[in-house]
Image (tube, grey):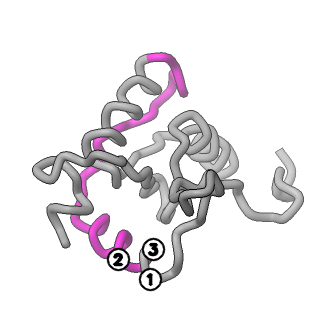
Amino acid sequence: MTGRSRWPSGKMPVNFTESDGKGQIMPLNNEQKKQYKSIGHDLKPVLIVAGNGLNEGVIAELERALVDHELIKVEIRSEDREERAETIAELCKAGRAELVQTIGKKALIYRKNPQPNKQLSNIHRYK
């Protein structure tokens, strides 16, 4: 792989999850990202993507985790930085979620649940 980014803008694409009620999807604002990063600091990874990459089982577990918790931490066990970035982008796309932050091999991913379980949702538990 080359040292260039795969994406024209140089940044990894993300899928936004908040809707403005008119069908337009809105990105998280900086205040929300700051709050979610704070919550995510103490979270343990609920999903680990290893050598087999993204398969049906990983996608199913991602979906379950996002429905239950809204904000999740994911660990990508790959040594190649570009491969990790690509896997994270694919995870966000598959889960229709937004990337909040990446640090090393871990990513913080968010997708709003319209009917969150207040006992399971990391957003509601840590507010």
Q: Quadrant of residue 21?
A: bottom right
What residue lies at 26% left-to-right and 41% top-to-bottom?
68
Mark 3 and mark 2 in contact? Answer it, CB < 8 Å. yes
Query: In front here: 109 or 19?
Result: 19
Q: Callout 2 environment at 10 Å: few (<14), some (14 to 19), or many (20+)?
A: few
How packed mark 1 is, by other alpha carbons closer than 10 Å (few <14, some 14-19, many 20 or more), is few
The residue to which callout 3 is attached is 33
Residue 8 versus residue 25: which sits nearer the camera? 25
Disc 3 to disc 2, how far (Cα)?
A: 5 Å
The image shows residue 64 at horizontal and vertical percentages of 32, 31
Kind of residue indicated by mark 1: Glu
Residue 78 lies left or right of residue 45; in this view the side is: right
Secondary structure state at the residue bearing disc 3: helix
Mark 3–mark 1 Cα distance, whole angstroms, equals 5 Å
Position of residue 79 measured from the top left corner of the image (x, y, whole percent): 56, 45
Q: Is residue 96 visible?
A: yes
Residue ID at (45%, 73%): 33
Local SS, label 1: helix
Residue 127 position within the rendered picture, expressed as x and y whole percent measured from the top left: 19, 72
Q: Amino acid at mark 3?
A: Lys
What's the amino acid at mark 2?
Gln
State which region is magenta.
Answer: 33-56
Vertical order, 116 against 65 (above or below): below
